[in-house]
Image (tube, rainbow, N blue to C red):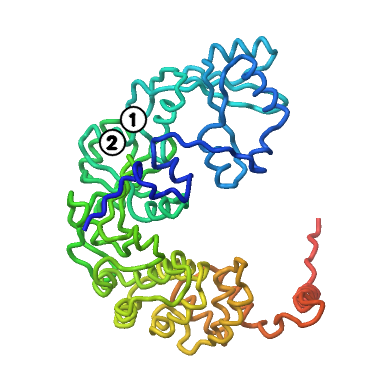
Amino acid sequence: MLRHLCLRHRPVLSCSWSRLCLLKRRLFTMKVQSPEFQSLFTEGLKSLTELFVRENHELRIAGGAVRDLLNGVKPQDVDFATTATPSQMKEMFQAAGIRMINNKGEKHGTITARLHEENFEITTLRIDVVTDGRHAEVEFTTDWQKDAERRDLTINSMFLELFVRENHELRIAGGAVRDLLNGVKPQDVDFATTATPSQMKEMFQAAGIRMINNKGEKHGTITARLHEENFEITTLRIDVVTDGRHAEVEFTTDWQKDAERRDLTINSMFLGFDGTLFDYFNGYADLKNKKVRFVGQAKQRIQEDYLRILRYFRFYGRIVDKPGDHDPETLEAITENAKGLGGISGERIWVELKKILTGDHVNHLMHLIYDLDVAPYIGLPGSAGLEEFDRVSGNVEGFAPKPMTLLASLFKAQDDVTKLDLRLKISREEKNLGLFLVKHRKDLRRADGPEPLKPYQDFVIDVSMASPAPTRRKS
């Protein structure tokens, strides 16, 4: 059943003002006083702001720098927006004896001022009057909202307009929707559309938009390159034939059919660019309640792609607050289909396993992997030392250990590391770390007493003294 939430009119995202800014058009304001914000106020910026205030022009930090500040990160680059036109800025800077550099951006409203050994790039508020998918003719304005409307959400407005103009629906899909609703900025944003790959190619070619990486086209994915960004857009599809690893697909215009083929309810939602959430399988409720469930029957979803067993564990470690609550049908389906992981490539398994090891509830999940007989099919030893794993996972809680640091505690001999490498194709660095930890585990146990680091210091000294001195080249 479709749950249709319009995020502009309901306080769905009230717990996170950053998401409100992303998904609502109503103005939201707040005061920022963070150390990262205060650190921006160099002598140059103070002089610049005083000049704009004196001339009755508004000046604000804009775009990506605002996003970074609100995320608690000091921006590497800071762009500014202003109500002053380029001509007014030039006149103001010339009168104040401020040098201007790089006038290439002036026709688009950008003036770069050099002040106290710093460059300040300031752009007049503007509206895109004519766009061709690559460039825009602009008109200056003093309306902050008009300028905000032409900016992107990580999707360029011209890109969205292209789909609208051709009567194709375009929505943010899957994991990015989950992250936005969870108050997390997505690392990757995937898009879904009713347009077929052929229609997208025709549309992008007509607009002069470059397309890259055509490997995903047979599965419906086109990657467009626009304004130094890649946009991966996939046609809505149905899995017609699956073998547990790959699927033959058929394109559709039915959003629910596409949602049905996704793995977990929290990954099956779509988000429109007006802030409307499209939720067919109660993914939003599961996200709020910290539950991880398969879409439909767990057994069917797993048999479509056996890697979904590990994805279930991975997202359990990201979403759930307290471990232990699992749907019995899900656990039964995992046990019945664990051997299917034997046909999945080691590289794909290792990607998921590393994410499990760096997530929450790793101790609970590793015990589950053994209890459900998953371990032998993903390269882990059948008779692992879970007591040692319990000890190590407890010691590193609150830190950020490398995945192999934890995994090595399951191994009794270096041969276990070699077998893991044969199955999962781990990197040389990961293999060497595993071999090292297994070999020296007993020597490097945390010491009791006032010098807990002494065994580590002694080991480093012993190794360095045992190593042969480098031979000097004869000149």
Residue at the bottom extreme of this rendering: 383
Residue depicted at 54% across the width and 77% down the height: 407
Q: Which SS class for mark 1?
A: loop
The residue carrying pointer 2 sits among few (fewer than 14), some (14 to 19) or many (20 or more) residues within 10 Å by Cα, namely: many
Q: Is residue 354 left or right of residue 470?
A: left
Q: Are marks 2 and 1 in contact (CB under 8 Å)?
A: yes
Q: Is residue 463 left or right of residue 330?
A: right
Locate residue 103: give its quadrant: top right
Query: What's the amino acid at mark 2?
Result: Phe
The residue carrying pointer 1 sits among few (fewer than 14), some (14 to 19) or many (20 or more) residues within 10 Å by Cα, namely: many
Q: Nearer the viewer, residue 50 or 462?
A: 50
Q: CA distance from mark 2 to mark 1?
A: 8 Å
In the rendered image, residue 242, in percent from the top left (x then y), is placed at 22, 67
275 lies above or below 396: above
Q: Is residue 135 left or right of residue 397?
A: left
In the rendered image, residue 412, in percent from the top left (x then y), is placed at 57, 87
Q: Nearer the viewer, residue 431 or 267?
A: 267
Residue wearing tag 1: 133
In the rendered image, residue 36, in percent from the top left (x then y), is placed at 65, 42
Quadrant in the picture for the C terminus: bottom right
Residue depicted at 21% across the width and 58% down the height: 1
- Numbered label attached to residue 98: none
Q: Earlier in the sequence, mark 2 or mark 1?
A: 1
Query: What's the amino acid at mark 1?
Result: Gly
Q: Examine the rendering and report whether any part of residue 214 can be seen.
A: no
Residue depicted at 56% across the width and 12% down the height: 88
113 lies above or below 61: above
Q: Examine the rendering and report whether any part of residue 415 can be seen.
A: yes
Residue wearing tag 2: 204
Locate residue 159: give its quadrant: top left
